[in-house]
Structure formats: C-alpha cells, structure tokens
Amino acid sequence: MTRRLRALQRFIADVRAWRQARRDYQALCDEGRAPRLEFSVGIHPDDYEWTGINGVTALKTTVPLTPRGKQYMAGVIHDIERTCIRAVLDTNQREAGRG
C-alpha cells in the first residue's frame, strides 16, 4: 500500500509541476518572450505536378511559438492547400469544356 501511495504522490507532484511549468511558459509568452520558430513551408520543388501552379505555394517566415503564431502557420498551410484545390478545379473545368 505504501508503494502505491508513494507512486500516486509522485504522479500528483509531476502533474502539478507540469501545470506550473505551463503557467510559467504562458507568462513568458505573454511578456513577448516565447521561442521563435523559423518555418519554410512550400510545395516540394521536385513535385512537378504542383510546382507550376499560380498563387500561394510557399512561405519562409519566423513566428513565435504562441497560439497566434501556430494559428498563422496553420493558415499558411490552408492557403497553400486552397491554391492546389483551385488548380484542380480549374483543370477539371478546362477539361470539361473540351469534352
């Protein structure tokens, strides 16, 4: 029983320490001291099927590791995907017009 109790106490202490560390990290972010990540996102240059499309296909930037920075990068990926979908739509419409 004591072994289980000690294991449970360690677990609770670890959870509390993790939560405190998250609060401390959030405080650093709120002060503008979040780590900054450099991203280079784009369609691979050897992917010939997609590299010739017009629109947003790549971006290189540095963003803070904050909810806003993560949201920004998700938006970039979404924009690139939308550009690819638009290219497929345009191709489908062009081919339907030829049929």
Image (cartoon, rainbow, N blue to C red):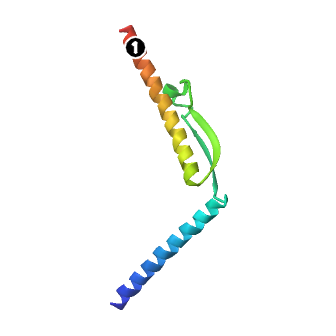
Query: Which corner quadrant of the image does residue 57 belong to?
Result: top right
Q: Position of residue 26 (x, y in %)?
A: 58, 63
Q: Where is the N terminus found, in terms of image quarters?
A: bottom left
Q: Amino acid at mark 1?
A: Glu
Left or right? Give the position of 46 relative to 88: right
Considering every residue shown, the one lying at the far bottom of the view is 2
Q: Position of residue 41 (x, y in %)?
A: 57, 40
- Between 29 and 4, the residue placed more toward the observer is 29
Task: Say which residue appears at 54% left-offset and 31% top-offset.
Answer: 46
- Between 78 and 41, the residue placed more toward the observer is 78
- Between 4 and 24, the residue placed more toward the observer is 24
Task: Say which residue appears at 52% left-offset and 41% top-offset.
Answer: 75
Considering every residue shown, the one lying at the far left of the view is 1
SS at mark 1? helix
Q: Where is the C terminus found, in terms of image quarters?
A: top left
Image position of 71 with respect to 57: above or below: below
Left or right? Give the position of 37 relative to 77: right
Query: Which corner quadrant of the image does residue 98 belong to?
Result: top left
Image position of 98 with respect to 13: above or below: above
Q: Position of residue 94 (x, y in %)?
A: 43, 14
Mark 1 = which residue?
Answer: 95
Left or right? Give the position of 10 relative to 70: left
Q: Position of residue 31 (x, y in %)?
A: 66, 61
Neighbour tally class for label 1: few under 14, some 14-19, many 20 plus, Cα within 10 Å: few
- Between 51 and 15, the residue placed more toward the observer is 15
Task: Say which residue appears at 64% left-offset and 43% top-offset.
Answer: 61
